[in-house]
Image (cartoon, rainbow, N blue to C red):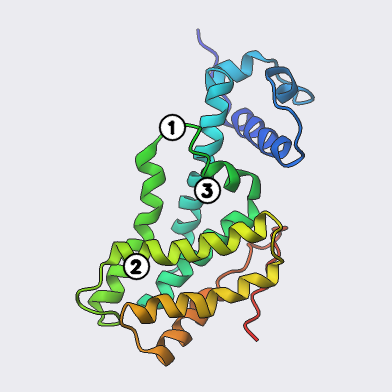
């Protein structure tokens, strides 16, 4: 009779791999399980080998991002909703910087490509709300707007996570995102208020070590 898999072991190995990445430790079959209390066989049982570890590690970043989107409360203001979505993306990167780096490593295959791509779907739906509510031009492309606000946020948080820029850089999200959404047709003054309201969601969960400065002054 096959032994039932313990999800906690899988998570433990993934988190250890992410931590080893952060500390620039060489990751091998033996070093991965060292000190975990499980044998090297666990890597094959849960991942099919080291290649599977890398695939699962990349997928885990998108899985956690999708879970964070699920916890968001959708505001009435569609622009605030759109910005809160990219703010959640940034918080996810700040809280799990090691997974964030692996998420966009195209040399590693994803376990579920559609699940990863669906995370952009939250932003597309919010952008479509913006168009339907008349906040952006009727001929504005929601997918393009979603991609543009994601690109801005990705650029900002990549600088912070890689320590090229300080966390004060996060405050630049308000003027940059405002410019992108105004270019799509929103009123500048109204847009800035909505963006500020959405960007304030850029706060780590209680107990998180991902402390972010979001001052816009």
Residue 138 location, x and y as percent? 20, 77
Identify the residue position indicated by label 3 in the image.
64
Identify the residue position indicated by label 2 in the image.
145
Q: Nearer the viewer, mark 1 or mark 2?
A: 2
- Of residues 106 and 27, the one drawn nearer to the viewer in this rendering: 106
Alpha carbon separation for disc pair 3 and 1: 14 Å
Residue 126 location, x and y as percent? 34, 68
- Residue 126's label in the rendered image is none
Q: Nearer the viewer, mark 2 or mark 3?
A: 2
Alpha carbon separation for disc pair 2 and 3: 23 Å
Relative to 81, 7 lies left or right: right
Q: Secondary structure at mark 1?
A: loop
Tell me if residue 61 can be seen. Answer: yes
Q: Residue at x 37, y 47 (%)?
A: 117
Instruction: Decide which of tag 1 and tag 2 comes sooner along the chain.
Output: 1
Alpha carbon separation for disc pair 1 and 2: 27 Å
- Labels 3 & 1 near each other (Cβ < 8 A): no
Q: Nearer the viewer, mark 3 or mark 1?
A: 1
Instruction: Decide which of tag 3 and tag 1 comes sooner along the chain.
Output: 3
Residue that sits furthest to the bottom in the current view: 189
Dividing the image into 4 quarters, which one contains the C terminus? bottom right
Instruction: Decide which of tag 2 and tag 3 comes sooner along the chain.
Output: 3
Q: Residue at x 51, y 31 (%)?
A: 55
- Labels 2 & 3 near each other (Cβ < 8 A): no
Q: Residue at x 44, y 79 (%)?
A: 179
Residue that sits furthest to the left in the current view: 139
- Labels 1 & 2 near each other (Cβ < 8 A): no
Identify the residue position indicated by label 1 in the image.
111
Q: Secondary structure at mark 2?
A: helix
- Of residues 124 and 37, the one drawn nearer to the viewer in this rendering: 124
Q: Residue at x 70, y 26 (%)?
A: 27
């Amino acid at each position: 009779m096959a032994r039932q898999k313990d999800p906690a072991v899988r998570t433990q190995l993934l988190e250890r791999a992410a931590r080893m990445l952060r500390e620039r430790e060489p990751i091998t079959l033996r070093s991965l399980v060292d000190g975990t209390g499980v044998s090297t066989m666990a890597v094959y049982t849960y991942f099919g080998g080291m290649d599977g570890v890398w695939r699962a590690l990349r997928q885990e970043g998108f899985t956690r991002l999708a879970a964070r989107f699920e916890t968001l409360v959708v505001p009435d203001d569609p622009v605030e909703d759109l910005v809160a979505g990219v703010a959640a993306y940034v918080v996810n990167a700040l809280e799990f910087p090691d997974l964030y780096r692996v998420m966009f490593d195209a040399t590693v295959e994803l376990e579920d490509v559609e699940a990863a791509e669906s995370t952009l779907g939250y932003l597309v739906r919010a952008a479509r709300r913006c168009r339907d509510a008349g906040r952006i031009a009727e001929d504005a492309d929601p997918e393009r707007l979603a991609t543009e606000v994601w690109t801005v946020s990705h650029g900002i948080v990549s600088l912070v996570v890689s320590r090229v820029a300080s966390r004060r850089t996060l405050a630049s999200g308000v003027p940059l995102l405002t410019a992108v959404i105004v270019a799509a047709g929103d009123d500048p003054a109204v847009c800035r208020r909505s963006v500020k309201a959405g960007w304030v969601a850029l706060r780590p969960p209680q107990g998180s070590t991902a402390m972010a400065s979001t001052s816009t002054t």
